[in-house]
Image: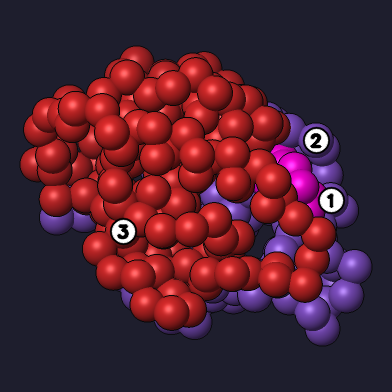
Chain colours: A red, B purple
Amino acid sequence: MQLDETLKGMLIDHVPHARAIGLEIVWAEKARARLKVPYASHLVGNPDTGVIHGGVITTMLDNACGVATQMALGEPSAIATLDLRIDYMRPAEPKLDIFGEAHCFKVTKSVAFVRGTAFHDDINNPIATCMSAFMLAANRAGPPSSGMREKIMGEMDKLAGKDGPKTRGEG
Amino acid sequence: MRDLELISQGRDINEVMASIPYVAFLGITFEKVADELLGKLTFKQDLIGNPSLPALHGGVIGGFLETAAIVQVARESKIRVLPKTIDITIDYLRSGRPLDTYARATITKHGRRVANVQVVAWQDDPEKPIAAAHGHFLLEPLGDPESSAA
């Protein structure tokens, strides 16, 4: 699926930290999303090995889980990460881009449950996996991003009409 | 990292931190307060994850907590390579406002191969933490050939 530029813009370009680490949305569909962080020297956590810092993987997985949750919700909703657990299976390899795929597998009235996986080229050989819970309708009293969210949901509806992809991992 | 031995010897941690690109990029520094190590994440616009609130990116807070935990373990261990994160669980308690953030890590158990660490982060009021984390970190003691968490 080719993601609409407008949607990408709203989910990434308007998020300063996503821009700062070069985060990209590869694709997004109902309840699922795949993001990418290109290898970059300012993201290195161990200068001896050139391996990317775990915080970058945390950021990408948190964001991927958030996008998957947005894609799972039937109507615009502000969400907030309640908790996020990351398990590191192996070190990332230097010089390689990192992908993060997330699947929002359950939405209740108040909470969404999401799993995610970070990997280089094979989702079955993960760098890290994560499990997270999001509170829905967070910041209800606060001033909103709701205009933005409605726009995002509109874009998602358009996307939903297009042909689906592709290989899916267990996100 | 070679510099780890310097940390456990009490050398200036910020010199070592400045040599780690991602830590320097986020703007994480450490200071000693009454013999405790306090991590500081200096606010900058690049750390924002939700521009409409605005709020710090949850991943930035997670990376900060993980860094504070690793540095605390490095400081209290005789190891030659950075402790490896086995797992970390982050509880988000309040949204991170566009302010400087502080963190303190406590080692709850320091085993031969694994350290259990808890970390708390707050902004202007230590009584109102914005996030808490606990994690397991793999140690490679001098002379231990094992190198993977598996």
Tell me: residue A104, above or below residue B80: below
Which residues are the magenta region? B47-55
Q: Quadrant of residue B105?
A: bottom right
Instruction: Identify the residue under disc 1.
Output: B98
State left or right for residue B26 relative to residue A76: right
Tell me: residue A133, above or below residue B78: below
Q: Is residue B49 magenta?
A: yes
Amino acid tagged 1: Pro
- The disc numbered 1 marks a residue on which chain? B
Amino acid tagged 2: Gln
Name the spot of residue A108 as percent of width and height, x first: 37, 77
- The disc numbered 2 marks a residue on which chain? B
Kindly check if marks 1 and 2 are in contact, taking CB atoms under 8 A apart as contact: yes
- Residue A104, disc: 3
Q: CA distance from mark 1 to mark 2?
A: 8 Å
State left or right for residue A43 relative to residue B130: left
Kindly check if marks 3 and 2 are in contact, taking CB atoms under 8 A apart as contact: no
Q: CA distance from mark 3 to mark 2?
A: 29 Å
Amino acid tagged 3: Cys
Q: Secondary structure at mark 2?
A: helix
Q: Residue at x 28, y 69 (%)?
A: A106
- The disc numbered 3 marks a residue on which chain? A
Instruction: Identify the residue under disc 2.
Output: B45
